[in-house]
Amino acid sequence: MVTNKSPWVIGMLSLLCVVLSACRSEHTPRQWEGQWHRTIAVPKGVQGRCVEEHLHIEKKVWQLRAVLYPTFRCANPFLELVYAGTLDQVEIKKNTDNRQLSLFVEAVNLIEMADITAGERYVIGGSALKNMAAQYVPASYTSFRQSVSLSKDNKQMLSNMYIPLLNIAIAEYPNKSALLNYQRE
């Protein structure tokens, strides 16, 4: 027997099936997600130190591990900084084949600092880390916009640096909004 409620019931059951299947489906990684690596060299004629960055983006997690070197040469690292934040929003620019986007990162904190000189690793934590956090994450940089341009094969990503890290490593960097190359790990 078919009644007037049948289309409504069928619609509700269909909607329920869609919602339940969405809850059970596994997360499909977006093209910007994954492990990324880059080495930032000091431009000629500018004082600063070499920096290696390891960026991890997964779902709403944004984590940046930076290894700093004492000079422009990428030899004998001395400090490791780990920043973490929440990927709040992703804005994809129109007509770019989903290759140009902005990542809006919120609640950025310095979650780990380690002295890594002479092959040893001494983690600075507790109140010492908390006291230094303001120096490494100024209040005006607890949220920021990360501009991203992805290659067609998604193996390279151009992106600007996190400014507090850039200021620590290469304070006089000529173009602080420059997009620098990451390689997918």
Image (tube, grey):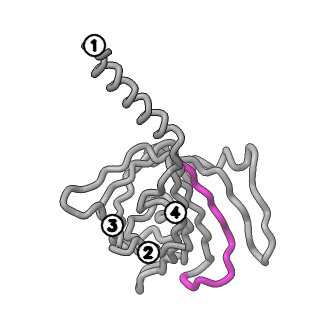
147 lies above or below 89:
below
Measured as percent of width and height from the top left, residue 180 is found at 39, 73
Tell me which numbered mark, 4 or 3, is placed earlier along the sequence: 4
Q: Say which label, 1 or 4, has the lower sequence index.
A: 1
Residue closest to the eye, 171 or 76: 76
Left or right placement of residue 20 versus residue 149 in this view? right
- 87 or 65: nearer the viewer: 87
Residue that protrudes farthest toward the front in the picture: 1
Q: Which mark is residue 34?
A: 4
Q: Amino acid at mark 1?
A: Thr
Q: Identify which residue is drawn at 31% across, 58% down.
A: 101
Q: Report x, y in % for residue 169.
A: 52, 69
Q: Which residue is mark 3?
A: 149
Q: Which residue is mark 1?
A: 3
- Quadrant containing the N terminus is top left
Q: CA distance from mark 2 to mark 1?
A: 55 Å
> Horizontal placement of 117 versus 141: left or right?
right
Residue 128 at least partly seen: yes
Depth check: give the residue in front, 131 or 41: 41
| 12 shown above or below 162 | above
First of labels 4, 2 by sequence position: 4
- Residue under the image location 20 percent in, 56 percent down: 94
Query: What is the three-letter code of the residue carrying label 3?
Result: Ser
Q: CA distance from mark 1 to mark 3?
A: 54 Å
